[in-house]
Image (cartoon, rainbow, N blue to C red):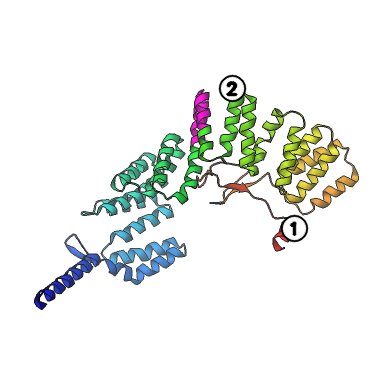
Amino acid sequence: MTPLITLGILVALLVGLAAGKAWERYKLRDGRWIDRRRARESPHYMLGLNFLVANQIDPAIEELGRAAEAAGDPLEIRLILGNLYREKGQVGRAIQEHQALLQRPNLRKLEHANVLLCLGLDYRRGGFVDRAMEAFSEVLRLDPGNQYALANLEKLHEEQHQWAEAYAARQQLAAGEPAVNQARHNEILAFLENEIGLEALKAGDIASSAERFQSAIDLDERNAPAHLNLGDVRLRQGDPAEARAAWEQLVAHSPDRAYLTFSRLEASYDSGKFPSLCRQLIASQPQDWRARLALARHLRDQGDAGQALELLFDALAINPHGLALHQAIWQTLSALSLPPDLVTRYMELTRNAVFYVDPHICVRCRYRSTELLWQCPHCHEWNTFVEDRVSTEGDVLKAEG
């Protein structure tokens, strides 16, 4: 190869590289070349981002608006501005901003999909469910497998109680995820299977509902409502042994949710078996105050109020803030004719207690509820509620040790 040819190849490579860099930096719009970097280098752009990080929406909108004007209204800044209007509650303004972006000529496929996704979020925030579904579906047509569009479609279907459609969307989400994330997808699919089973049960299709509940358990053996519902269905079908087996599986796989089965198992068991179950749970989970409460109620009903009260005092040391415990203690003290020494002991144990009605809190959004919910009504995430228990002095000492 002659030096002249080599030089020509090098020149061609340099020209190609320069053209590529120019294409990356500049974009032709409405007959004008727009410098993409100019927007990002603008002090208004940087100020806007700083305000955004500080959660100061109004000054962020003002600075990003100036940056957009200075740089020729680049799409990415206008997209952000529309999203900020939505977060501020100005849904109509956000919709106008994003609809205007869709009218721009020569939008690339991915840009079109991103604008539609933001528009779908606007519609969802504004309560325009059909339009939101249409926008997210169009995103998937342009960008199949778009995780954000699928996730929002699933939530929209859940909010409308369209469980089968939500299940299909979650399956598509799971299909594009690595194996390490499949456990969470199966957990959500199990809850959706359970909801489909409940719909079948309401429609009177008991056999189909049982299949759905079993499918939910196969997806996630820790799914508490599926175990409970399967046991209830088996009992309705006249098979108490299978019902007990379903409830006992819940105790085995999710001992922290075992208390959900207590009333069912106590009614189903022969004499002596229920106390044995409670004692096993107490031995395996020393902080389980609910098992102590259930055993105490059982013993009190059997006439052993003294032992019941000791169990309740033990439970009170673990969770002095549970109103259900205090109610049970006063009922038991009344059954013992309010002995002064035991009343005094109770008063000492509860001197600094604040009473809660068995509070539960969502670990995602901090929404509070007086009952255990399987789906948060605020953030709509599945299986995020835990018991919100104030730490006792014993807990603090144990943590420090």
Specify the amino acid type for callout 1.
Answer: Glu
Q: Which mark is residue 198?
A: none
Q: Where is residue 134 in the image (x, y as percent from the top left)?
A: 33, 41
Residue 197 colored in magenta in the image: yes
Residue 32 colored in magenta in the image: no
Q: Residue 237 carries which label?
A: 2
Q: In this view, does 39 lie to the left or right of 380?
A: left
Residue at image position (74%, 50%) is: 318
Front in this rendered view, residue 256 or 390? 256
Q: Is residue 199 left or right of residue 33?
A: right
Magenta span main SS: helix
Please, which residue is most extreme toward the front here?
1
Residue 333 showing in the rendered view: no
- The crowding category of the residue bearing disc 2, from other C-alpha atoms within 10 Å (few below 14, some 14 to 19, many at least 20), is few
Q: Residue 399 is drawn in which quadrant? A: bottom right
* Circle 1 residue: 393
Please, which residue is most extreme toward the right here?
340
Q: Position of residue 17 (x, y in %)?
A: 20, 69
Q: Position of residue 86 (x, y in %)?
A: 40, 53
